[in-house]
Image (cartoon, grey):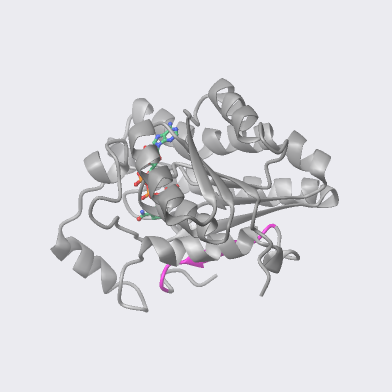
């Protein structure tokens, strides 16, 4: 199967940690030139060094705050400097901290909405002019099963991710005529392997789970395990590739059967 990703410019937001890191590495393994757009430059550089040392594809880090349109526009300019193109955008940055909605406050709402939803507006708006000029482009937005079903103690996050799903479908309808595809990949619970995340990862501060908690969570999945970063990364690469050239506006869960819709 020809994926058509060799030599392509691929932006991965939050590509320094966990799922984003695996996505960046998976695209590089297909020969893509990856732009890691992460607020944590140090962690992003670790992943870029790993990719460049492996000798397939390439990677650069552009320090970016995806909640700022200005910062994203600067990043997209740098990303397209060499070839004038951005072929693939993967919106991977997201954040949550579990709590009952009744206990959440406006600061929590603002952070969840900025990192999970506004970030996607900023990046899609910034790459669309380039993709339209190319008459081709693929966008994969990382959603969550929470956004499909509404998850216990993740109410605001569920709403923001549900918003990402609806937004993606709407943009897919508008931009299909320009050869641009937009799809959503929803991970299930995907804890990071050791040393695969930086200090701005939610797993450093807000998402600590004990092995016992993870084991209990795994029992809720038909496949009886939680996800690995590559469980998410490989379907993302497929959705962005020419192999999925007739797939747009779709939401795919890579979550061990946690949701089936
Ligand atoms: N891991 C899971 O269990 C899980 C489950 C469902 C959905 N998701 C979704 O998958 C995506 C990735 O999750 P993860 O667990 O790998 O996240 P993570 O928190 O481990 O990594 C996020 C990355 O984004 C970077 N980042 C944080 N704020 C940023 C900003 N303002 N601008 C640019 N970069 C910033 C961090 O430095 C980090 O490298 C998110 O959208 C998340 O909502 C994750």
Displayed-image quarter of ligand 1: top left
- Residue 2 in the figure: left or right of residue 112: right
Residue 255 in magenta stretch:
yes
- x and y percent of residue 227 in the render? 36, 66
Write the residue at 30% across / 51% down. 196
- x and y percent of residue 214 in the render? 22, 63
Hey, which residue is sitting farthest top in the picture? Answer: 70
- Residue 99 in the figure: left or right of residue 17: left
Residue 209 in magenta stretch:
no
Q: Residue 106: which quarter of the image?
A: top left
Quadrant holding the N terminus: bottom right
Write the residue at 43% across / 42% down. 94
The total of numbered circles placed on residues is 0
Nearest the camera: 40 or 153? 40
Q: The magenta stretch spans which residues?
A: 249-256
Image: 245 above or below 48: below
Image: 141 above or below 185: above
Write the residue at 37% across / 78% down. 222
Hey, which residue is sitting farthest right in the picture? Answer: 177
Nearest the camera: 113 or 71? 71
Write the residue at 27% across / 37% down. 199
Residue 98 in view of the camera: no
- Residue 120 in the figure: left or right of residue 232: right
- x and y percent of residue 193 in the render? 27, 58
Quadrant holding the C terminus: bottom right
Residue 101 in view of the camera: yes
Q: Residue 216: which quarter of the image?
A: bottom left
- x and y percent of residue 239 in the render? 62, 62
């Amino acid at each position: 199967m020809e994926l058509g990703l060799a030599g392509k410019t691929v932006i991965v937001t939050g590509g320094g940690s966990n799922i984003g890191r695996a996505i960046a590495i998976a695209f590089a393994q297909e020969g893509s030139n990856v732009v890691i757009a992460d607020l944590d430059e140090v962690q992003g550089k670790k992943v870029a060094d790993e990719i460049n040392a492996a000798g397939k594809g390439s990677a650069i880090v552009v320090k970016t705050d995806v909640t700022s349109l200005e910062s994203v526009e600067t990043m997209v300019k740098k990303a397209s400097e060499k070839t004038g193109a951005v072929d693939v955008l993967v919106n991977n940055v997201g954040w949550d901290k579990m709590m009952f909605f009744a206990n959440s406050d406006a600061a929590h709402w603002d952070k969840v909405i900025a990192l999970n939803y506004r970030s996607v507006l900023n990046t899609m708006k910034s790459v669309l002019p380039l993709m339209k000029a190319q008459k081709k482009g693929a966008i994969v937005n990382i959603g969550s099963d929470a956004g499909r079903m509404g998850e216990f103690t993740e109410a605001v996050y569920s709403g923001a991710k549900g918003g990402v799903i609806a937004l993606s479908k709407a943009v897919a309808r508008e931009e299909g005529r320009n050869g641009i595809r937009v799809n959503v990949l929803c991970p299930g619970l995907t804890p990071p392997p050791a040393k695969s995340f930086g200090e701005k990862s939610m797993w450093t501060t807000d998402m600590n789970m004990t092995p016992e908690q993870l084991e209990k969570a795994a029992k809720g999945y038909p496949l009886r395990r939680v996800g690995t970063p590559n469980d998410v990364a490989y379907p993302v690469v497929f959705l962005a590739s020419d192999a999925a050239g007739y797939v747009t506006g779709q939401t795919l869960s890579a979550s061990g059967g946690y949701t089936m819709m």
